C-alpha cells in the first residue's frame, strides 16, 4: 500500500476521498489508505488479495457465531420477503420483535422482562440513562438525575453515553460534557490509580461509589452504570467481590444499577451473561453486539418490572412515552437475532466459550514471561495482554501506545487481527473457535511480541 494518498487507486482512493472512519488517525489513513476486507469464513476474514487473517477481535467484539453463516442469510432474506420494515411507534408491532422480546426475557437475569430495541450499544445505554431519570421523576424524586460511572469505562459516543464514558480521548473536541455525570476509579489492580494493592485495599475503588453518593446526596443520584469487564478501556477484569459490593451500595442507596453487557453479553465469558458470574440482579441491562453477531445492527435496553410498572401506572394520562428510534424493533434485524440465538443454543457456543475459553486463558498466560509482557488477564473468550517497557516498574512505552501498535501491526502481517488500546492488546475471538485455532492465535502473538522485542534492541 502506498505512503502517498495521491497514488492510491480504485477502492483505496474512493475510501480516502469519501469515507470518514471512526477511531482512526485521519492523516495516517489519508496517506496510507484502508485495510479492505472482502469476505469471511468461520473465525477468518480475507482481504482483496485473498490473504487470510484470524479475526481475533470478532469484528468489533461481536461476530460470535463466526462469519458466513448461510442460515443467517436465509433468515434475513425470508423476513425481507415477508415484511421489510414496520415501526414500533404508535403501538405498531411485528412478529420477529415480539418473539425476540419474549426470547430475551427468558434468558436474561430474573425480573428483566421489558425490552426497548435500539440499533446498537450507544443507543441502548442512552436509553437506559434516560429511563433512569424518567423513573425517578415518576416516583416523585425529580432531583435524582446524576449518573455515576468509572474512569476507563466505555459506554458509547452519543452525548449522554459519551459523558458516561470514562476515557478522556473520547471527550476531546466534543466537550463540554452533558451535566450531572460523575466518575470514580476503575478496578484496575495492575495500575491502581489509588496506589493500593488488592485485597488489602478493601476494594477502595468500589467504596468510592458510596463516597460520591454521600458527597452528592443520595437524593440526587439516579444510577450507576458499569461494564462488568471494562472492554475498550483495557479488558479490565475486577476482583470477584467487586461487583457484589457495588450492587449492595446501589440497593442500599436506592440508586439504579445499569449493567452494560454490550461486549460481555451472549456467552463471551462462558455464561450467557457475565452477570451470572457475580450473582447480580441489575434493574437495567444494556445489550447489543453479539445479539445478532454483527450480521445486522441491534441493541436492547432491558428493565425490571418495577420500572415498567411505574411507567405504566404513574405516567400522566394522555402522555406518550416520548423516546424511540426509527429502527426500534426492526423486523429483519429481530429475525436475524432470533436465528443467531438459535445457532448459539444448538451449537452450545456458550459452553464452548467456557471450555475453550479456559484453555485460551491458560495458553495466553504462557506469554507472561516475555520481557515486555506486564500482565495477561481475561475471562472466557475475552482477554488482554498489557505491554510494558520495563516489567519491574511497569513503565509504559514512550511514546504511549507505541509498543501495542508495533505488536498489533506485526500480528496483522502474520495473519491475525487484534486491537491495540494503547499498549494493551485486546483479544475476543468468535465463540466457535477451537483449541487448535487458539494455539494458532497464541503462537502468532508470541512471535509478534518476540519480533518487536528484537526490533527494540536494535
Image: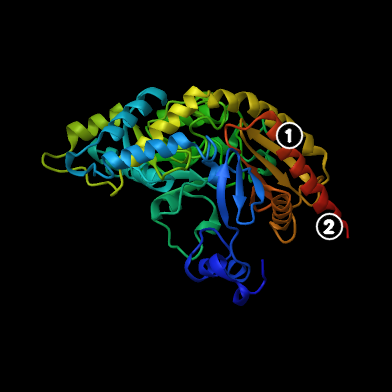
Label pair 2/1, CB-CB below 8 angstroms: no
- Say which of 335 and 248 sits in front: 335
Q: CA distance from mark 2 to mark 1?
A: 26 Å
Q: Which mark is residue 223?
A: none
Label located before the other in sequence (2 or 1): 1
Outermost residue toward the left in this view: 318
Numbered disc 2: secondary structure:
helix
Callout in the foreground (2, 1): 1
- Say which of 308 and 86 sits in front: 86
Residue on which disc 1 sits: 439
Residue on which disc 2 sits: 456
- Say which of 20 and 367 sits in front: 20
Q: Quadrant of the C terminus?
A: bottom right
Please say whether residue 391 is visible from this viewpoint: yes
Q: Is residue 117 left or right of residue 228?
A: left
Within 10 angstroms of label 1, few (less than 14), some, or many (20 or more) residues? some
Residue 117 screen position, x and y as percent? 33, 40
Q: Residue at x 72, y 29 (%)?
A: 362
Q: Which quadrant of the figure has residue 194? A: top right
Amino acid at each position: 500500500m502506498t505512503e502517498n494518498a495521491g497514488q492510491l487507486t480504485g477502492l483505496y482512493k474512493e475510501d480516502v476521498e469519501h469515507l470518514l472512519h471512526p477511531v482512526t488517525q485521519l492523516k495516517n489513513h489519508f496517506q496510507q489508505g484502508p485495510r479492505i476486507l472482502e469476505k469471511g469464513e468461520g473465525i477468518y476474514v480475507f482481504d482483496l488479495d485473498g490473504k487470510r487473517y484470524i479475526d481475533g477481535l470478532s469484528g468489533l467484539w461481536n461476530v460470535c457465531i463466526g462469519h458466513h453463516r448461510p442460515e443467517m442469510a436465509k433468515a434475513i432474506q425470508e423476513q425481507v420477503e415477508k415484511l421489510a420494515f414496520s415501526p414500533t411507534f404508535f403501538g405498531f408491532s411485528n412478529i420477529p420483535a415480539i418473539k425476540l422480546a419474549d426470547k430475551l426475557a427468558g434468558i436474561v437475569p430474573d425480573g428483566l422482562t421489558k425490552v426497548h430495541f435500539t440499533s446498537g450499544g450507544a443507543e441502548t445505554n442512552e436509553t437506559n440513562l434516560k429511563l433512569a431519570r424518567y423513573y425517578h421523576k415518576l416516583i416523585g424524586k425529580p432531583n435524582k438525575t446524576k449518573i455515576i460511572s468509572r474512569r476507563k469505562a466505555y459506554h458509547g459516543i452519543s452525548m449522554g453515553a459519551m459523558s458516561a464514558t470514562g476515557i478522556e480521548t473520547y471527550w476531546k473536541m466534543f466537550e463540554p460534557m452533558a451535566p450531572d455525570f460523575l466518575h470514580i476509579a476503575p478496578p484496575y489492580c495492575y495500575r491502581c490509580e489509588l496506589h493500593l494493592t488488592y485485597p488489602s485495599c478493601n476494594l477502595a475503588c468500589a467504596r468510592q461509589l458510596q463516597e460520591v453518593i454521600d458527597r452528592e446526596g443520595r437524593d440526587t443520584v439516579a444510577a450507576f452504570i458499569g461494564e462488568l469487564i471494562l472492554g475498550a478501556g483495557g479488558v479490565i477484569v475486577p476482583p470477584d467481590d467487586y461487583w457484589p459490593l457495588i450492587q449492595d451500595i446501589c440497593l442500599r442507596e436506592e440508586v439504579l444499577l445499569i449493567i452494560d453487557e454490550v461486549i460481555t453479553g451472549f456467552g463471551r465469558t462462558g455464561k450467557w451473561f457475565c452477570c451470572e458470574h457475580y450473582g447480580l440482579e441489575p434493574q437495567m441491562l444494556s445489550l447489543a453486539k453479539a445479539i445478532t453477531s454483527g450480521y445486522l445492527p441491534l441493541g436492547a435496553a432491558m428493565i425490571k418490572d418495577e420500572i415498567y410498572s411505574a411507567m405504566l401506572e404513574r405516567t400522566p394520562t394522555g402522555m406518550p412515552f416520548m423516546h424511540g428510534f426509527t429502527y426500534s424493533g426492526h423486523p429483519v434485524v429481530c429475525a436475524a437475532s432470533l436465528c443467531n440465538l438459535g445457532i448459539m443454543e444448538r451449537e452450545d457456543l456458550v459452553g464452548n466459550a467456557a471450555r475453550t475459553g479456559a484453555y485460551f486463558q491458560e495458553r495466553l498466560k504462557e506469554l507472561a514471561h516475555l520481557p515486555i509482557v506486564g500482565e495477561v488477564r481475561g475471562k472466557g473468550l475475552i482477554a488482554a495482554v498489557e505491554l510494558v517497557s520495563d516489567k519491574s516498574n511497569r513503565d509504559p512505552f514512550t511514546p504511549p501506545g507505541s509498543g501495542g501498535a508495533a505488536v498489533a501491526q506485526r500480528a496483522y502481517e502474520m495473519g491475525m487481527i487484534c486491537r491495540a488500546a494503547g499498549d494493551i492488546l485486546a483479544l475476543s475471538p468468535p465463540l466457535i473457535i477451537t483449541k487448535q485455532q487458539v494455539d494458532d492465535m497464541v503462537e502468532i502473538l508470541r512471535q509478534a511480541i518476540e519480533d518487536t522485542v528484537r526490533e527494540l534492541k536494535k
